């Protein structure tokens, strides 16, 4: 189950933050979103910090996925030109369990022909682009990611318009960022 989460992040501070940590946090708030993830990874401690602490460092998630176990997975896509989507895992009691980058080879390998749009979104997070192709009756969802040799790439899932299922998968270089 997923729920939209549009509430503003609470203005909590960590007790005992030093000057450098406050300075790094201020840099995040100034708009360097990719840097926020780096700071969050270094600041947040599994089991010690809470969902509110995550929100204070990373902001409001795009989506909060609620699992049957009571755990939450908070989705932080870093776009539209970004190449990362972070999933932050929260225990049923609100404790921080860790974070993982979604746009990695292992997750791309899990995307298979026949999967639904929900299946793809669950594994990779919000897509970067959606492109309809009327003549072939497909809708292509694309995720921008950092490929080999520091090339920005797209992972594409081609969905049949009628069934909403993946009919093929492709990858291509992101010509918009390659000059």
Image: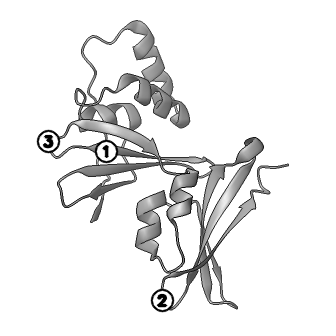
Q: Which residue is mark 1?
A: 89
For the residue carrying disc 2, how many other residues have a C-alpha within 10 Å: few (<14), some (14-19), or many (20+)?
few
Q: Residues within 10 Å of mark 3 (few under 14, many from 20)?
A: few
Residue picked out by circle 3: 93
Q: How is the image coloured?
A: one colour
Q: Are marks 2 and 1 in contact (CB under 8 Å)?
A: no
Q: Of helix, strand and loop, which one carries label 2?
A: loop
x 46%, y 26%: residue = 39
Give me the disc on residue 25: none
Which element type, helix, strand or loop, lies under badge 1?
Answer: strand
| Image position of 166 with respect to 134: above or below | above
Q: CA distance from mark 2 to mark 1?
A: 31 Å
Q: CA distance from mark 3 to mark 1?
A: 12 Å
Q: In percent of the image, x 49 and y 82: which residue is there?
A: 165
Q: Is residue 162 left or right of residue 140?
A: left
Instruction: Pinpoint residue 107: horizontal percent, then vertical percent.
Output: 51, 56
Q: Is residue 10 visible?
A: no
Circle 3: element type = loop
The alpha-carbon separation of the residues under discs 3 and 2 comes to: 38 Å
Question: Where on the picture, by quarter, is residue 51?
Answer: top left
Q: Which mark is residue 163?
A: 2
């Amino acid at each position: 189950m997923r729920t939209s989460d549009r509430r503003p992040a609470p203005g909590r501070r960590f007790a005992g933050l030093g000057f450098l940590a406050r300075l790094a946090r201020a840099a995040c708030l100034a708009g360097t979103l990719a840097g926020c993830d780096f700071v969050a990874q270094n600041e947040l401690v599994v089991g010690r910090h809470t969902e509110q602490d995550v929100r204070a460092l990373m902001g409001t998630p795009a989506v909060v996925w609620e699992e049957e176990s009571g755990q939450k997975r908070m989705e932080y896509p870093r776009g539209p030109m970004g190449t990362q989507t972070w999933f932050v895992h929260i225990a049923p009691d609100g404790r921080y369990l860790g974070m993982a980058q979604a746009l990695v080879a292992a997750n791309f390998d899990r995307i298979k022909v026949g999967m639904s749009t929900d299946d793809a979104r669950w594994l990779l997070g919000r897509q970067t682009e959606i492109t309809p192709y009327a003549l072939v009756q497909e809708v292509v969802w694309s995720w921008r990611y950092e490929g080999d040799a520091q090339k920005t790439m797209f992972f594409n899932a081609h969905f049949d318009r009628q069934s909403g299922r993946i009919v093929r998968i492709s990858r291509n270089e992101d010509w918009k960022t390659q000059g």
